[in-house]
Image (cartoon, rainbow, N blue to C red):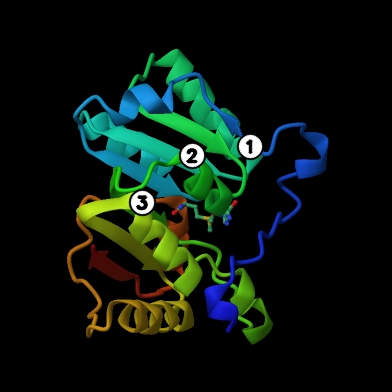
Amino acid sequence: MNDLKKPKFYSNHRYRQDQKKEKYSESHNNLKELLINGQLNIVDIGFGTGTSTKQLSSSDKNNYIGIESYMQGINNLKKYIKKNKIENMCVFHGDAIEIVNEKLPDSSIDQILIFFPDPWPKNKHHKRRIINLYTLNLFFKKLKKGGLLHFATDHIMYAYNTKNMFEKFTGQKILFNSNRRKRPITNYERRGLRRKNFVFDLIIKK
Ligand SMILES: C[S@@+](CC[C@H](N)C(=O)[O-])C[C@H]1O[C@@H](n2cnc3c(N)ncnc32)[C@H](O)[C@@H]1O
């Protein structure tokens, strides 16, 4: 039944909600304007230091909405936006689930990317994982018809757990995807590869 509840937000000592008056903050680029400019709308959840968001947004004209709770990552991406006058990116600081729920209009998003979310390998951590039936329902509500949810991890148990969750949610057999699409190599992937971990990609379509 935990699968149907909002995952517990884990602050990991990097997000101090009590120090902030607002629940979450948004960068200077206006999300509403971005969402209607006719480009693809891509959400990068838990972007860490922002490697994927930066690389992806510099390779095309699509709109990138980055969400992170790690303040250093937020500051890093905000600086990058300002310095390079990036107009196709918007950054949110806070709990991704709340931000997706409250800030993204339904059926407005083309892709949701979740690359190397903290794996929470222990059983007792399951309720903190960002993928469960509650979040899949939420993400699919925000995706346009034909929109994609792309998940990647180098944690084998998390990969199989997510695959099972995707199958339960879609009612279809889901295979690991051999095509990483445009997913850039992030620090976390590099770290996994150094440890000789295999990287699993899972993609589902609305
Ligand atoms: C292991 S890092 C991966 C970062 C990046 N995607 C990469 O591939 O390098 C996972 C990130 O997800 C963020 N995160 C986890 N749960 C979150 C949530 N509910 N809301 C916002 N960020 C979250 C963490 O702060 C962390 O920076």
The amino acid marked with disc number 1 is Tyr
Mark-to-mark CA distance, 2 and 3: 10 Å
Q: Are marks 1 and 3 in contact (CB under 8 Å)?
A: no
Asked if residue 26 is positioned above or below residue 130 in the image, the reply reads above
Which mark sits nearer the N-terminus, 2 or 3? 2
- The residue tagged 2 is 103
Identify which residue, 138 or 131, lies in the foreground. Answer: 138
Q: Quadrant of the N terminus?
A: bottom right
Asked if residue 82 is positioned above or below residue 103 in the image, the reply reads above
Identify which residue, 106 or 165, lies in the foreground. Answer: 106
- Binning the other alpha carbons within 10 Å of mark 2 as few (below 14), some (14 to 19) or many (20 upward) gives few
Mark-to-mark CA distance, 1 and 3: 19 Å
Residue 8, given in percent of the width and then of the height, sits at: 66, 65
Q: In which quarter of the image is the C terminus?
A: bottom left
The amino acid marked with disc number 2 is Lys
Asked if residue 137 is positioned above or below residue 45 in the image, the reply reads below
- Binning the other alpha carbons within 10 Å of mark 3 as few (below 14), some (14 to 19) or many (20 upward) gives many
Image disc number at residue 142 = 3
- The residue tagged 1 is 24
